[in-house]
Image (spheres, rainbow, N blue to C red):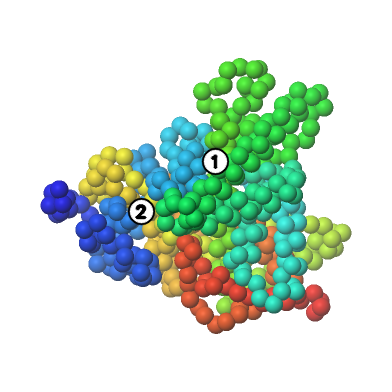
Amino acid sequence: MLLQWRNFLKDKRLPPGSMGWPFLGETLKLYTQNPNTFFSKRLKRYGSIFKTHILGCPCVMISNPEAVKVVLVSRANLFKPTYPRSKEMMIGPEAIFFHHGDYHSRLKKLFQTSFLPCAIKGSISDIEHIVLKFLPSWENTSTINTLEEMKKFAFDVAMLSVFGGQLLPEVLTETIKQLYHCLDKGYNSMPFNLPGTPFRKAMKARKVLNETLMRVIAENKRRMEISSSSSKKQQQSGGLLEVLLAGSSSKDHQHHQKPNYDQLSDSQVADNIIGVIFAARDTTASTITWILKYLHDNQDILYKVTREQEVIRRRRRIEENRGLTWEDTRRMPLTSRVIQETLRRASVLSFTFRETVKDLEFEGYLIPKGWKVLPLFRSIHHCEDFFPQPEKFDPSRFKVPPRPNTYLPFGNGIHSCPGNELAKLEMLIFLHHLTTTYRWEVVGDDDGIQYSPFPVPKGGLPIRVTSTMMNI
Ligand code: HEM
């Protein structure tokens, strides 16, 4: 059997590359060194499409923009998303990112409806409220851990995007927070379902979280029924939950029909709520943490960003101290480029996974059915042909749009990120208040990176924050 496998791997039609040791493959090499070194060594040796063997799976890694487009966009139906079973169990098997085909496109339309600019515009003052609750709490603390704080911030915004403006009772929000925290702790642990392991604890928390969400869903359905039958239609509070419920079952509610074949069940809705918090929190938190690091290290850019934000703050003050508006956030070109450059330079989602649904002829190579295919976003973002001096933090490079398919912080094609506008909006609002009112010093001088699992500044970037209000 092993011999057969070895002989098969000699097939000249497979992409070049080494499959490493039997069973182990190159897993240890990938996980015991900086992943960038792993990718760039192989890129140099084998070119932009190479094979390897990671975590028990044969893989093909791709860092050629056109080939990545084929995987994610033009022949996306032949490359389905793939995650370890343990991760599916933890987030919920009905969550959007595990699916392909009709169920996925139906969900995707609902997600997009919920996160379109016209839908998220209305949440600016709520996001601002969250920011203004956070920042002052940093002032009286000697050192804060940026990553941990930004996780709390991104969690609150994710909750807002799911439940809209409606106020969940504080105790319920706190319960969801605690349960999610416990789930998250087990997410990156070894999937051993034994008493006392983080995995077992996380699965238990997931069960309770699911039950809690089921109650919230039932309550919302009741509320929506009352408001649709009452002559005085109540103002809808928005949020993904309402869109998922309205998009899935309103017909059945109103006409008492049998469930429609494509109606979302309550557990499908619950899985997608957990899924969206999962997709939104650590990605956004890691990106903001990097922004603070890069601005701290590039004081000239921080100065210019502050000037840009102060112009907006002055206008807000003149106009009766109003809050930020959507139009304000469209007048932040430099701050937006700082976000774009951070997404490139830090590439928090270094790659994604797909799996071939059949044997494929791909760019002159054979990729057998069931092999994993990994588009390497980070390698493309760090290729000097597309981004000269790739290690330099240089927002001005985005004055010119990047070449097609070379800038993929939010992916591409049918699985691309529906939350990208919300992510950028919350970062702009956060940066407006941070830069116009505070300065921060990084504590300790370590420039290292840690993988948790996204790349983040070492130790989560401990900082000391001071208010500049006294100087104004
Ligand atoms: C800086 C922050 C973020 C980054 C870098 C990011 C990045 C990405 C990427 C690269 C994908 C595609 C993955 C793939 O093709 O396999 C994705 C998918 C997704 N993202 Fe984001 N994301 C961010 C924030 C958010 C936010 C705030 C939300 C929601 C509120 C969100 C919701 C989702 C969802 C639901 C998917 C799955 C889409 C699908 O499978 O069709 N993301 N994200």
Q: Which mark is residue 106?
A: none
* Mark nearer the viewer, 2 or 1: 1
Label 1 sits on a secondary structure element that is helix
Q: Is residue 29 above or below residue 83?
A: below
Q: Is 434 left, or right, of 151 in this rendering?
A: right
Q: Residue furthest bottom?
A: 445
Residue 311, x across and y down, in percent: 75, 67
| Kind of residue at badge 2 | Leu
Label 2 sits on a secondary structure element that is strand
Quadrant in which the C terminus appears: bottom right
Foreground: 195 or 5? 195
Residue bearing mark 1? 271
Query: Mark 2 to mark 1: distance in Å?
Result: 25 Å
Q: Is 464 left, or right, of 315 in this rendering?
A: left
Residue under the image location 39 percent in, 61 percent down: 380
User: How dense is the environment of label 2, judged by Cα within 10 Å: few (below 14), some, or many (20 and up)?
Assistant: many
Foreground: 348 or 210? 210
Residue under the image location 22 percent in, 47 percent down: 366
Residue under the image location 70 percent in, 40 percent down: 238
| Kind of residue at badge 1 | Asp
Residue 4, x across and y down, in percent: 13, 49
Residue bearing mark 2? 374
Residue under the image location 76 percent in, 68 percent down: 136
Tell me, yes or no, if residue 326 can be seen here.
no
